[in-house]
Image (spheres, grey):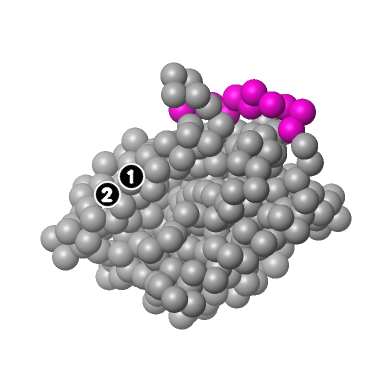
Amino acid sequence: MDAYSSERNDLSYSDQPPVILAASSDAALRRALPAVEATGARIAARLSIAEARDRIERQVSASAIWVELDEDGGGSMDELLSSVSRDVSDGRYAAVVSTTPALLDPVAARLVDSSIEIVVDADDGQRISALSLAIARAGMPLSLSDVASDRNAERLRQLSDEVSRIASTLARLSTGPTAAPAAVHKPVAPDAPAVSAETVRSIIRARRLRGRYFEEELFADPAWDMLLDLLQAEISHLRVPVSSLCIAAAVPATTALRWLKTMVQKGIFVRRADPHDGRRVFVELAPEASQAMRAYFAEVGQVGVI
């Protein structure tokens, strides 16, 4: 794809810190531009994946890096994502990575900083929201254009509601009414009887059957769906990569990733690198979360859990 340096005269300038675009193809670049431009950000450079890492290292200041991926960039992509993850951890800039479902595992394997926004097959509203959240999290100002402001504000409210619901759901699951919602405590029955994989699988099947009769959005509960999937995998001695867990969440992948990120931050889930494949990470229940799930199933007994 063609690369455009920050010295080009056709780039629009403002008093805001610049955003650098790195894309795996010309089509990917065209897909990223509308959302970034809608924020009113100044675009400092438009780069291919292969040249982005060196260009970013030379950039004096940037508010954010936007990486748009529609094909596997191999080693260059891996190196860029690892570099971006380190830089975000060091507070150099914010970052958004937009990708496809097919690339979700290699992308997730390289992006270890939880403040990086990952979107999957996202629309313009989700993209604008992702950039706004990433920059806000990094403590940098960003003013949205009038075209995008209403849509962005609504999306931000939705994301806030999602995070709040995660906290309250986990608190009810694993703690008493006076316990702190941010932590998962050991359940009162750590020696709970074993739960069979078939029991958990039957519950998952029953939850999916609801989609035959009602809109699936009515029952969206990604935190619980992911907990069930990881419990089933643990009982069956299976490993669950990020992409599979996002599918199990039964919500759009971008939404599932945000829930996954929060569950990891709260110590409910644990990321494990695949020792045989550096481009994949597995997700599993933290020991306390596993005990909480097993104790829960023991307590409800024969009552149908859906």
| Residue 2 visible within the image | no
The residue that mark 2 highlights is 157
> In terms of depth relative to the viewer, which is nearer, 58 or 53?
53
Does the magenta portion include 183? yes
Please rate how many residues cluster around mark 1, counting C-alpha atoms within 10 Å: few if below 14, some from 14 to 19, many from 20. Answer: few
Q: Is residue 166 left or right of residue 304?
A: left
Question: In the figure, 184 relative to 274: above or below?
Answer: above
15 or 74: nearer the viewer: 74
- For the image, the number of numbered tags is 2
Q: At which x and y percent is residue 299?
A: 63, 36
Question: Where are the magenta residues, as a range?
Answer: 181-192
Please report contact status of discs 1 and 2: CB closer than 8 Å, yes or no.
Answer: yes
Residue type highlighted by circle 1: Ser
Q: CA distance from mark 1 to mark 2?
A: 5 Å
The numbered mark at residue 160 is 1
Q: Residue at x 40, y 43 (%)?
A: 165
Going 48% across and 34% down the picture, which residue do you hit?
172
Locate residue 215: give its quadrant. bottom left
In this view, which residue lies farthest toward the bottom?
27
Q: Secondary structure at mark 2?
A: helix
Element assignment for label 1: helix
Does residue 177 lie above or below 279 as drawn?
Answer: above
Residue 184 place in picture, x, y as percent: 57, 29
Image position of 124 with respect to 6: above or below: below
User: Mostly what secondary structure, the magenta segment?
Assistant: loop
Res. 203 in view: yes
